[in-house]
């Protein structure tokens, strides 16, 4: 469960990117298992792994951070053992995301915005 935020400003402060985006497409990348983990499967079952989701989005309005035209958001599938997130294809949404050390944008279930784009914009421009 994600903790409630007290303001749009405090939620935005936790993220590198706050933007209005249109969700274009999603690709599912199956987890890779090493040769040794497949070989050892007969003894003990491997721990569950979620597939990776790569969702392509068009930036409509940048509220915080920097991003060009289209971005790819990396996430895992929703459910256990990961806190992944899915975005509705074709919809316009408010996106909260961070960049990892490799420079990829990522998100998870607690990156769901608790405020509207207008509230984020007002909090970060005043």
Image (spheres, rainbow, N blue to C red):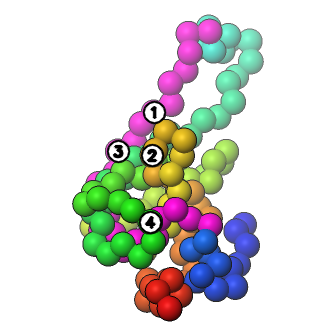
Magenta span has 64?
Answer: no
Q: Is residue 35 above or below residue 33?
A: above
Which of the two labelled residues, at mark 1 and mark 2, occupies the earlier sequence position? Answer: 1
Which of the two labelled residues, at mark 3 and mark 2, occupies the earlier sequence position? Answer: 3
Does the image show residue 92?
no
- Does the residue at mark 4 contact the one at mark 2 (Cβ under 8 Å)? no
- Does the residue at mark 3 contact the one at mark 4 (Cβ under 8 Å)? no
Identify the residue shown where x is 63% and y is 15%.
Answer: 37
Residue with the mark numbered 1 = 30
Which of the two labelled residues, at mark 1 and mark 4, occupies the earlier sequence position? Answer: 1
Q: Using a 10 Å C-alpha cutoff, classify the residue at mark 4 as few (fewer than 14 neighbours), some (14 to 19) or many (20 or more).
A: few
Which of the two labelled residues, at mark 4 and mark 2, occupies the earlier sequence position? Answer: 4
Identify the residue shown where x is 44% and y is 66%.
Answer: 65
Quadrant for residue 45, please give it: top right
Q: Which segment is the magenta one?
A: 14-36
Instruction: For mark 1, give the secondary structure.
Output: loop
Gap between marks 1 and 2, in whole Å? Answer: 18 Å
- Does the residue at mark 3 contact the one at mark 1 (Cβ under 8 Å)? no
Q: Which mark is residue 104?
A: 2
Instruction: For mark 2, give the secondary structure.
Output: loop
Tell me: 14 left or right of 4. left
Gap between marks 3 and 1, in whole Å? Answer: 10 Å
Residue with the mark numbered 3 = 27
Gap between marks 3 and 4, in whole Å? Answer: 25 Å
Mark 1 or 4, closer to the camera = 4
Magenta span has 34?
Answer: yes
Pick the front one: 28 or 14? 14
Gap between marks 1 and 4, in whole Å? Answer: 30 Å
Q: Using a 10 Å C-alpha cutoff, classify the residue at mark 1 as few (fewer than 14 neighbours), some (14 to 19) or many (20 or more).
A: few
């Amino acid at each position: 469960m994600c903790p409630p935020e007290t303001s749009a400003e405090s939620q935005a402060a936790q993220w590198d990117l706050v933007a209005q985006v249109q969700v274009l497409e999603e690709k599912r990348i199956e987890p890779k298992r090493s040769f040794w983990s497949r070989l050892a499967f007969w003894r003990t079952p491997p721990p569950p792994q979620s597939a990776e989701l790569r969702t392509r989005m068009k930036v409509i309005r940048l509220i915080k951070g920097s991003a060009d035209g289209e971005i790819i958001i990396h996430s895992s599938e929703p459910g256990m053992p990961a806190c992944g997130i899915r975005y509705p294809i074709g919809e316009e949404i408010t996106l909260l995301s961070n960049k990892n050390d490799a420079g990829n944008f990522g998100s998870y279930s607690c990156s769901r915005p608790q405020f509207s784009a207008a509230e984020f914009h007002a909090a970060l421009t005043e």
